[in-house]
Image: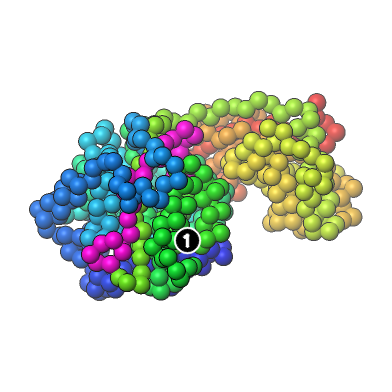
Amino acid sequence: MYFNFNRTRRSVACGLILLAMWGLGQNKAKGQIGIEGTRRPMYAGTWYEADPEVLKNQLNQFLAKATPPVDEQSAGILTKTNSPITAPITAIIAPHAGYVYSGQAAAYSYKAVQGKNIKRVFLLAPSHYVAFQGAALPTATTYATPLGDLYVDRDVVSQLQHYPAFKRMPDVHRVEHALEMQLAFIRETLGEVSIVPIVIGTLPSKADVKLTGELLRRYITKDDLVVVSSDFTHFGPRYDYQPFTTNIKENIRKLDGQAYEYISKIDLTGFLEFQERTKDTICGFYPCCVLLSMLDAGTHSTLLKYYTSQDTAQSESDNSVSYLSIAFSGKDWSQPQSIKSDKLSEADKQALLKIARSTLNSYVEKKTVPTLAELGITPSKALLEEKGAFVTLNKHKELRGCIGHIWPLKPLWQSVQENAVSACSVDYRFDSVKPEELKDIEVEISVLYKPRPISGYKEIVLGRDGIVLAKNGKQSVFLPFVAPQFGWTLDETLTQLSKKAGLEPDDWKEGAHFDVFQAEVFEEGKHN
């Protein structure tokens, strides 16, 4: 059984199947979550040992055997020499099946970080039981394990919940084994660190992946570790995935090797295209994508261990699940700087205005979007840079449509083109632009510099700053020129921003999160 999102088949139900394999139905759950309490272990005693001493001994046996170098079996999926680990280790990928299946593989990841100066773990896991889009935050403040409790960083969770991409979803966390199977390893190897457990649902586009990573990245510091919980290829009738019928073990190994090659290159685009092409049933696909979107260029990837369930004593003849242990190192999680790019050249502005105007005319008249080649435009480096942008349509000096991307998630030229289409067709405040209106419409483009968080609204400078207000999963934005255009004070601006977000007029005064950004604005016939 699969949930089907965005035409991409996903093995999100493999956890339900594994529950049946272990004889564990929900009626046998070991514990339940409180809305603001402790999430108790559901799988202790079934998927792993419940007795603390027995579990501790089991984990330590796994860790003792987790010694480099990578063995011949693991190295067989590498297409090049394995990169060595270079301090610091910033992230790991570890599997999450029952410990008799994947515990030894997971131990390699945790052995690599054992004893390191890690104070907090961001734990990203897939959803096996509940279908949703976005990221699910915990409501519990404590995650219990047989080896001791782990406490949630409530401040980070409270900050993240303001963004629409993140929602508190207790039902998702209650039954998710992909989270729980990492907790005992974290407690044993890293001690009483704080955790930020997040379940990643479907992310329909690359932009959604990058936005999730962009927002998470803000809160990750050099003393943090990111743990991605993921098994890899699920092959066989149990998982409804049998893309080949001969040389099965060899072909599974090749498929896992291809997936790892994109991961090792920190190649998000390639990894997304690989999955679309192969439909590979990597249950932690989206958490892996979010990690790739966050890692800095120059990060090293090291394969620590690889095998499949077929290689264990509990193997089934017709089905196979792959387990990879991976470490990422060499670049710490130093906070990224919000660097202001150089201003656009006159040629860049002319090109963007041509893209917006030609796209507007073509879409309104023919519902087609011209290519850059058809427009005779070769994009410069500045137009290929990922930036946010708004396209504003004015008719007789009155607003006729305005849509944009706040975050730098797409190449600038693409952001402008997509928003030109949206501004004329999907701005809910206006009817779609009609062909007879085109001669009276003027195009204005706002190119945004990367938003940065501020500690409070008193830091906002009207006329200079664009403002993003986020609270309780609702969000709204004003471009820098909005407040001066209407002659609003700061209080009036934030009141209007709250109302635009669907909040109460005074909700900006307490508990709201603010980002500010600057913009370079130019319009047809009026740029320098």
Q: Height in image: 24 above or below 436?
A: below
Q: Height in image: 326 above or below 337?
A: below
> Can you name the residue that lies furthest to the left here?
53
Q: List x then y, in percent, for residue 300.
A: 42, 36
Say if the magenta span includes residue 107: no
Whether residue 168 is visible here, answered yes or no, is no
Amino acid type at image mark 1: Asp
**Residue drawn at x 48%, y 42% as measured from the top left:** 266
Whether residue 409 is visible here, answered yes or no, is yes
**Residue drawn at x 30%, y 70% as measured from the top left:** 316
Foreground residue among 194 and 484:
194
Q: List x then y, in percent, for residue 320.
A: 35, 65
Which quadrant is home to the C terminus?
top right
Q: List x then y, in percent, for residue 428.
A: 69, 56
Seen in the image, is 199 located left or right of residue 183?
A: right
Q: List x then y, in percent, for residue 501.
A: 57, 49
**Residue drawn at x 78%, y 28% as measured from the top left:** 346
**Residue drawn at x 36%, y 35% as measured from the top left:** 84
Seen in the image, is 477 located left or right of residue 351?
A: left
Seen in the image, is 408 located left or right of residue 306?
A: right
- Count neighbours of disc 1 (C-alpha within 10 A) and say few if under 14, some if 14 to 19, many if 20 or more: many
Badge 1 element: loop
Q: Quadrant of residue 253?
A: bottom left
Q: Quadrant of residue 64?
A: top left
What's the magenta region?
Answer: 291-315
Say if the magenta span includes residue 292: yes
Which quadrant is home to the N terminus?
bottom left
Foreground residue among 459 and 84:
84
Q: Which residue is mark 1?
A: 280
Report the colour scheme. rainbow
